[in-house]
Image (cartoon, rainbow, N blue to C red):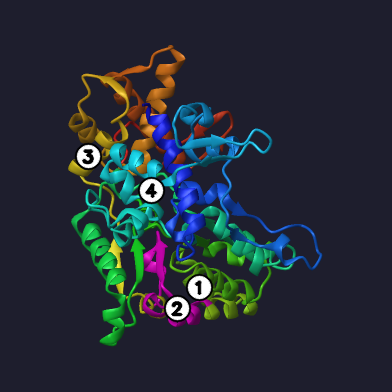
Amino acid sequence: MSNRALEVVEFLLTAHLYTEDRDLDENDLPPRYRRVFWTEPSDDDGDDDEANVVGIERPLVVTNSVARKATGVEHPWEAVSDLLFTQREEFSGRISLTQPDMATEWFLDRADRGRLETNPTIAAAVEEHDDVDVTHAEAREQTRPIQADRVWIDSLLDEYFDEEEDAEMLDLVHVRAPEEIEMTLDDLVLTTDQEGEIQKLMQAIEHREYLAEIGLREIGKILFVGPPGTGKTTVSRALAHELGLPFVEVKLSMITSQYLGETAKNVEKTFEVAKRLSPCILFIDEFDSVAKTRRSDEHAALKRAVNTLLKSIDDISLIRDEVILIGATNHPDQLDAAAWRRFDEIVNFPKPDRQMRADILRIITKRMDIAEFDPDAVAERTEGLTGSDLRMVLREAVLEALTEERTTLTQEDIVEAVEDFEERDNLKNMDMMSDGEQLVAGGGDGHSHDHAHEH
């Protein structure tokens, strides 16, 4: 029997068991199934409550198209039509189980532990089975909560915020579901300090009830500091993916935009979004904008907005609100004491050293075909480059090879891409002055920079 049949039987069995067991809720459904059964609100303004239900409603009805979306199997009914416990209604196209007990035994004979661990609905029904060592609680622990699903996030935002009235605030905030974040912590090269702080944060989340009991409520507010391209935003997003939490991202520089108004309302609603989506990560980028605005003599309304921001940071809590707050800045020297003291942890994101650069290169290139690749040699030539820079270098090498209709790279391709990157970086940092037809770089001595640029 093909794996396609196993996929479809699991889906049919899950739909049947969830429909029958009213003690189960949306968090018992695997995210890939929740998505296809989610009911959006109706555009009808009538009083029919049933028409405006948002969420997952019983019974869960499976048709060929629904099963295809949930399982990825192109022809679901064909995959299970020869099984004794399946049937299809010709008129409605509904696929269902005629003998659920037989379907359960068939499934358990073929499913491995990993499959059961990610399906709380089936785990709840079979945890007393002699051959099953996965409990319902374990499966729930392994399954991302519905609060992290894109459909749930969008429905909540639509319910709470008016598209026209809150347009400025919604431009300020960008919300990502964990399923939309491709980068994971395993894809990143972290310093020992960064790994340690992430572990401490995870422990704080797991033991937040204990921390509340002993009075440690001011925790879970972290400031990431370091040059651009060193991974502050990427690590924050990867952490959201790892924890299965919505990622709420705000760029503080946008608060000063003339298009976003000059009141504190947007700031307050930004934090309200985070509280409504909790548990979540609230990521505030360009935090040094706080200091710039506080020192400015202009725009009293913006100053009030920044003061509202600082007060909102004081008021939000991992323990009480289940919101992790991460601030990020490229310019820690511009922060004043009022900004610094809002955070209980400071995490440094330096430019990677030679060993880290080599490790980053190994991760970036793990799916590339490179003849005689020597990442240590490339790392030796790329002092001062960040992880973001290295990704740009590899992208350039790949594109250059494709212009020659090659999908296999060479060490020389990468070295040339490094040199090209350094040349572009030099041009970016030139003091350009027009002297007739001549452009003079640097101190105006007429000599172009070589490739030994200090980053």
Identify the element where label 2 is drawn. loop
Closer to the observer: label 1 or label 2? 1
Would you name the residue on which mark 3 appears?
359
Identify the element where label 4 is drawn. loop
Residue shown at 49% from the left, 57% from the top = 20
Mark number for residue 275? Answer: 1
* Contact check, label 3 and label 2, Cβ < 8 Å: no
Residue 207 picture location, percent across and down: 27, 73
* Contact check, label 1 and label 2, Cβ < 8 Å: yes
Identify the element where label 3 is drawn. helix
Residue shown at 31% from the left, 35% from the top = 364
Report if residue 316 lies within the magenta region: yes
For marks 4 and 1, give the CA distance: 29 Å
Categorize mark 4 by other alpha carbons within 10 Å: few (<14), some (14-19), many (20+). Answer: some
State whether residue 246 appears in this view.
no
Residue type, mark 4 in image = Gly
Closer to the observer: label 3 or label 1? 1
Mark number for residue 316? Answer: 2
- Whether residue 68 sits left or right of residue 117 in the image: it is right
Closer-to-camera residue (367/95): 95
* Quarter of the picture holding the C terminus: top left
Would you name the residue on which mark 4 appears?
229
In the rendered view, tell whether residue 221 sits above or below residue 17. below
Residue type, mark 1 in image = Lys
Closer to the observer: label 4 or label 1? 1
Residue 56 picture location, percent across and down: 57, 57
**Bounds of the magenta segment:** 309-336
Q: First in sequence, mark 3 or 2: give its number.
A: 2
* Quarter of the picture holding the N terminus: top left
For marks 3 and 1, give the CA distance: 37 Å
